[in-house]
Image (tube, helix red, strand yellow):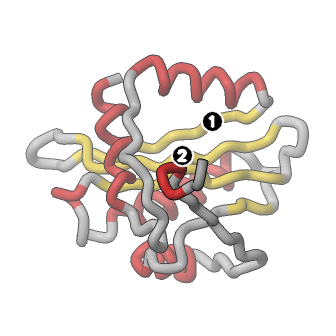
Amino acid sequence: LPTLQSLHESINDAPLDGIDLQPDVYPAERIRLYEQAMAARQQHLYRLMARHRSTGAWAGHTILCVDRTRPGSGIQEDTSVVSAHRGHRLGMLLKSTMLLWMRDAEPGLETIDTWNAETNGHMIAVNDRLGCFVNARGVALQRHLDDVDR
């Protein structure tokens, strides 16, 4: 699980469109609880992980969940690449390989929803290249509690 911890935490420096978030920490128990929660929600979790060839270091991962109650629907969860391994199109490799896997493993899968910050140009380019299109936009609002009059 330490490997999964570092792969999950590598998403902490993804663009957030100005939202001020504390870095997420992924101890083993949090990862286990996430996987158990997805199973309880009847989400079949698929994970691909990539290693650096010469060092064996884990370099990135992607997670996709398929809804067992609606097997035509999938949700792209995190795709992240460890900073030392960025710039080599690993995000594209991970996501495109996941799509190939889903074609065989989940032949009834019709749609996959994904999302990211509008300032995350790298992932937007990956999603565009894979044929994704914008079907909705979300707005994130934030207020710091120390700014609230008491």
Q: Quadrant of residue 6?
A: top left
Asked if residue 77 shows in the view, the reply is yes
Q: Residue at x 78, y 62 (%)?
A: 111
Q: Residue at x 54, y 46 (%)?
A: 63
Q: Amino acid at mark 1?
A: Leu
Q: How would you rate the neighbour count of disc 1 (Cα within 10 Å): few for under 14, some for 14-19, many for 20 or more? A: some
Q: Quadrant of the N terminus?
A: top left
Q: Nearer the viewer, residue 51 or 128?
A: 128
Q: Nearer the viewer, residue 58 or 114?
A: 114
Q: State how far apart marks 2 and 1 are (Cα).
A: 7 Å
Location of residue 140 in the rendering, given as x and y in whole percent from the top left corner: 63, 66
Asked if residue 100 shows in the view, the reply is no
- Whether residue 74 is situated above or below residue 105 in the rendered picture: below
| Residue where numbered disc 1 is placed | 45
State the residue lying farthest toward the right: 69
**Do the residues bearing badges 2 and 1 touch, measured as CB atoms within 8 Å?**
yes
| Residue where numbered disc 2 is placed | 63
Secondary-structure class at tag 2: strand
Left or right: 50 in relation to 37: left
Q: Earlier in the sequence, mark 2 or mark 1?
A: 1
Location of residue 139 in the rendering, given as x and y in whole percent from the top left corner: 67, 71
What is the number of the mark on residue 85? Answer: none
Q: Nearer the viewer, residue 57 or 17?
A: 17
Secondary-structure class at tag 1: strand
Left or right: 134 in relation to 124: right
